[in-house]
Amino acid sequence: MRPYIDKKNKMTKQIYVGLFIIFFIFSLLQVGILDERIFQAFSRVENLLKGMVPPTISEPIDVAGAAVESLQVAVMGTLWGVVFSIVLAMFAAKNVSPHISISYAVKAFAAFVRAVPALIWALLFIVAIGLGPTPGILALAVNSIGMLMKVYAEAIEEIDTGIIDALKATGASQFQVVMQGIIPSIMSIFISWSIFRFDINIRYAAVLGVVGAGGIGWELVRASRVMAYDEVLGITLVIFGMILLAELVTRFLKDRADMATLKAME
Amino acid sequence: MSEVVLETKDLSMEFPDGTQALKNVTLTIKKGELVSIIGPSGAGKSTFMRSLNMLNKPTEGQIVFEGENVLKARGKQLRQIRRRIGMVFQHFNLIKRSPTYQNVLHGRLGYLPSLKGGLGRFSEEDTRQALEILRRVGLEDQAFKRADELSGGQQQRVGIAQAIAQTPSLLLADEPIASLDPSSSENVMTYLKNVCQEDGLTSIVNLHQVDFAKKFAHRIIGIKAGEVVFDGSPKELTEGITNYLYYSK
């Protein structure tokens, strides 16, 4: 039996590898990765690079304002995302949901929301609301809900059912069980995922402006449209600095949260 | 001593998979009694106890607690019944990350409006009471520690404190010492008995250690395969009955 199964597995593997190679070659021909334009691009790249240095920022106040707006979009998007996610997670988690079908419905909603990228949400909200930071905030909030609700709900499903029983046995209402029992129990997971999501949202917020949803991305597009490549590099550096700063802040927050947990565990 | 606190009539429970966990359990518990339910694992002790405050729903029969029909109670009425029944669990079931006194205060949740309790806005009086109860179970020094920093025996005493904070008329304890070492068990049972006697509480304790049951209870009920097979004083519980309870098929 054993050699037969081995042989069969080997055969399957060979088929997969073969299909993969065929697909790869097909793609190469179809897309033309080795486009001859690549070889002619050197002079243009040279021009681009020459145009980029030295990086400048012609209107520092505008760019700074746009950077702050991006941060605001990220903060607000995360905040709304967190608030809605935690509420929805209570309905999504099987052990606290009023009914199992509600749990499935909410989870399906989250999966759908998650499947649509933030940029598409931004485009949709721009159509619905108009340009500016509001569609950006909504897009990030909706996109955050997709992810956070799933992780919060999983955290809730993992808590000990005994805790819920114990609080119910005291005559506590469902709201009290959630607030006094479930939320304290998932606090550390809740904090670390929320911080992680904030980190992601800052990166998104920088890009969302490209489609017109406010923030620094818009400045980047504006500069590239007028072929002011020195400004493009300048703004890119500002974005880089912004994300780096956010990274440092979130890491600091996370360490603080971890420290608090560790301290309490001792 | 004659006032009836709890009465069950023909209480039966069948799990969805067809297992018959309880068969026509008819019992009367009088005020001030310390009752111990013994029996092997899987006999239905926990199921019986959890039925009394509707943590699981019996399929047939009747439970009357202080004149109220428990099985018919819904929503607010059920919560008002539950707050008068304190419950202590085998695995303590405390909120590990919350401080000890907060866990005791959870016993007051049933008396607070939903929003106020949910936000943890306990009154000063309740907090004072909680600290007083912690003193009674010998944990006044641990009041502000996180619950999971306490040892198993201490956590179970917090569990008892939480149940007492409800000012219940009936105290249920579901295998309170099953996951404790012998000396902590001794200690927890002593506190449990003292608290019950000081407050004149009626109490039902599930135990599988017969010797503890004999020492603790006024009355012992033996359950086997979902049926009451013994109901009497500790003296009446002979070795023959214990053997029948635990060993015979």
Image (cartoon, rainbow, N blue to C red):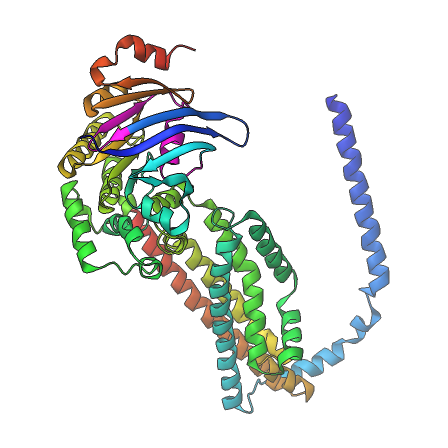
- Depth check, front residue: A214 or A80: A80
Quadrant where the N terminus of chain A lies? top right
From the viewer's perspective, tell me whether residue A190 is left or right of residue B49.
right
Magenta residues, start to end = B29-57
Camera sees residue A122: yes
- Depth check, front residue: A204 or A12: A204
From the viewer's perspective, tell me whether residue A225 is left or right of residue B118.
right
Q: Is residue B45 magenta?
A: yes
Q: Quadrant of residue A28?
A: bottom right
- Residue drawn at x 50%, y 61% is A85
- Residue drawn at x 35%, y 61% is B115
Residue B206 horizontal/vertical position (percent): 31, 28
Camera sees residue A170: no
- Tell me: residue A248, above or below residue B174: below
- Depth check, front residue: B215 or B49: B49
Q: Total marks drawn?
A: 0
- Tell me: residue B156, above or below residue A238: above
Q: Is residue B34 magenta?
A: yes
Q: Quadrant of residue A191?
A: bottom left
Q: Quadrant of residue B42?
A: top left
Residue B16 horizontal/vertical position (percent): 54, 32
- Depth check, front residue: B144 or A166: A166
- Residue drawn at x 81%, y 65% is A34
From the viewer's perspective, tell me whether residue B169 is left or right of residue A119.
left
Residue B224 horizontal/vertical position (percent): 39, 19
Residue B66 horizontal/vertical position (percent): 28, 39
